[in-house]
Amino acid sequence: MRQPDLFAGIQTPGMHVAGIDEAGRGPLAGPVFAAAVILDPARAIDGLDDSKKLTAARREELALIIREQAVAWCVASASVQEIDNLNILQATMLAMRRACEGLTVQPGKALIDGNCLPKGLACLTEAIVGGDALVASISAASILAKTARDADCRLLHEVYPDYAFDQHKGYGTVLHLQRLESYGPCPAHRRSFAPVRRLLVA
């Protein structure tokens, strides 16, 4: 497996570089999460990769290491209400901005996974398509965002056990759609997403 490069893009010696990624744009329920991570170049973390390519157990292991060894990290989210009011893209950008602004160390540059940049960051920014598999700091951010979102889905399952959020993690699986049909949307569902909206107007 090819290891992500520690940094990507134009660099300035001594500059803190944050990687930023999100988790949860596609699901029908729950907040969208984002994480920002500044890695220590002197403390490389083995096994970093796009969180989707890792097992759940490995993600949890790496999340602990990232939180212990990173120069700084922050996980943030945008709520279901913000997703419905703003749309999922803008809510994702909001969560990314909150994660970057929540870092205890100010980055000189932020590397963002994808092709869109959150507005208003007080640092240089660069979008990197597929960055979660190419840049270690973005890989680390993808892992923190994903593990935080999975933890939130486990909490949702405790509050709304009929929907099996612990199994499908909010995605539009056959099981989730069946539970939606049976019980209707709960407060955690995104009203602006078509499968949920259809049930509300039926």
Image (cartoon, rainbow, N blue to C red):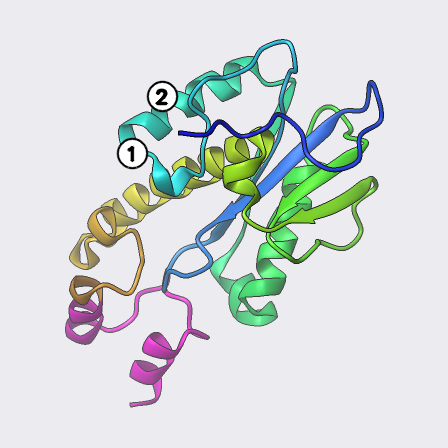
Image spot of residue 137 (x, y percent): 59, 30
- Under mark 2, the amino acid is Glu
Q: State which quadrant residue 191 falls in.
A: bottom left
What span is in magenta? 177-202
The answer to whether residue 152 is left or right of residue 128 is left
Q: Residue furthest top?
A: 42
Residue located beneath label 2 in the image = 61
Q: Residue at point 20% right, 59% down?
A: 163
Q: Residue at point 17% right, 66% down?
A: 174
Tag of residue 199? none
Q: How much space separates mark 2 and mark 1, taking CA atoms? A: 9 Å
Q: Is residue 188 above or below residue 183?
A: above
Residue 158 colored in magenta in the image: no
Image spot of residue 16 (x, y percent): 76, 24
Q: Is residue 29 above or below residue 132?
A: below
Answer few, some or many: residues within 10 Å of disc 1's Cα (few below 14, many 20 plus, some between 14 and 19): some
